[in-house]
Amino acid sequence: MLKLINVSKSYESAADIREDVLTDINLKVEKGKSLAIIGPSGSGKSTLLNLIGALDRPTAGSVIIDGTDLASQTDTQLAAIRNKRIGFVFQLHHLLPQCSVLENILLPTLADKSSQADDCKQRAMDLLEQVDLKNKMLHRPSQLSGGQRQRVAVVRALINEPDFLLADEPTGSLDKNNSENIAKLLIDINQRQNVTLIVVTHSTQLAEHMDEMLMLINGKLKNITE
Ligand SMILES: Nc1ncnc2c1ncn2[C@@H]1O[C@H](COP(=O)(O)OP(=O)(O)OP(=O)(O)O)[C@@H](O)[C@H]1O
Ligand SMILES: [Mg+2]
């Protein structure tokens, strides 16, 4: 289970001006559930997702993943949590242009010396088959369509069998058809593999498929699930 207790985040800019982006956020997400976070641009959605994904630390409060308070973890321990337990899909996919699809997907497995290269490769190919891209595994990202790249980014986020899949505007740069495909893929993974799914999105269509929908506004989360 994921728990946020009184989480606040402020940024201090060079001119000594403080911006309070998140104030006293409380949130509980049970294992295997899905949650959509919506809200205006600049309201702090990416900031919040980065805290949940152990990419950043809160100014105050606790982020607790299955009983472990992330504040008690060293940077090295946080890196291990990110690598093993959390899959992140970024808006602009962040695939390495010089690597093939397969190499991009296998990148997160390299950090774990105990993982067997052959097993990882087999898993990558199985996942690529699920998203209909096995025939593209030796292509480079520039040789793929936007929707295909985003599917590769989802596969890469899943390669280490994470407990949490965090997606920041996964359909932001896609047309309607591709958005729907990515939405279906995320929901399918959440339901079939019991992966907890948290999606930041502008798409109410995607948000409506989630168990819960929250809006981030003025630093607070509001429940807007019907
Ligand atoms: N590293 C940073 N340093 C200073 N301020 C930051 C930093 N990151 C974000 N901010 C500020 O925090 C606020 C929230 O930003 P954030 O990226 O979380 O918004 P968002 O809800 O994801 O917006 P969008 O929908 O446009 O992606 C913004 O005002 C932004 O300028
Ligand atoms: Mg954002």
Image (cartoon, rainbow, N blue to C red):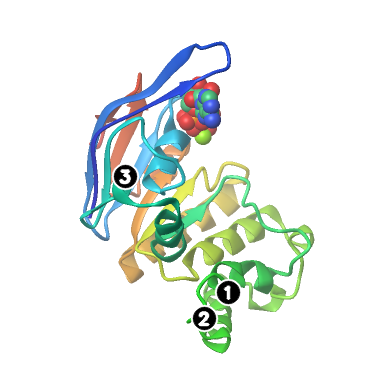
> From this viewpoint, is residue 103 visible?
yes
Residue 156 falls left or right of residue 10: right
Q: Quadrant of residue 144?
A: bottom right
Residue at label 2? 123
Dot placed on the residue nearer the N-terminal end, 2 or 3: 3
Residue 57: x percent and y percent?
40, 39
Label 3 packing within 10 angstroms: few (<14), some (14-19), many (20+): some
Type of the residue with mark 1: Leu
Q: Quadrant of residue 121?
A: bottom right
Type of the residue with mark 2: Arg
Relative to 31, residue 220 above or below: above
Real-space Cα separation, disc 3 to disc 1, in angstroms: 35 Å
**Residue, x 46% and y 39% (percent of image)?**
201
**Residue 128: numbered disc:** 1
Which residue is nearer to you in this view: 35 or 52?
Answer: 52
> From this viewpoint, is residue 42 visible?
no
Quarter of the image with the C terminus is top left
Residue 56: x percent and y percent?
44, 41
Dot placed on the residue nearer the N-terminal end, 3 or 1: 3
Relative to 108, residue 145 above or below: above
**Residue, x 47% and y 39% (percent of image)?**
203
**Residue, x 49% and y 11% (percent of image)?**
17
Residue at label 3? 71
Which residue is nearer to you in this view: 68 or 29?
Answer: 68
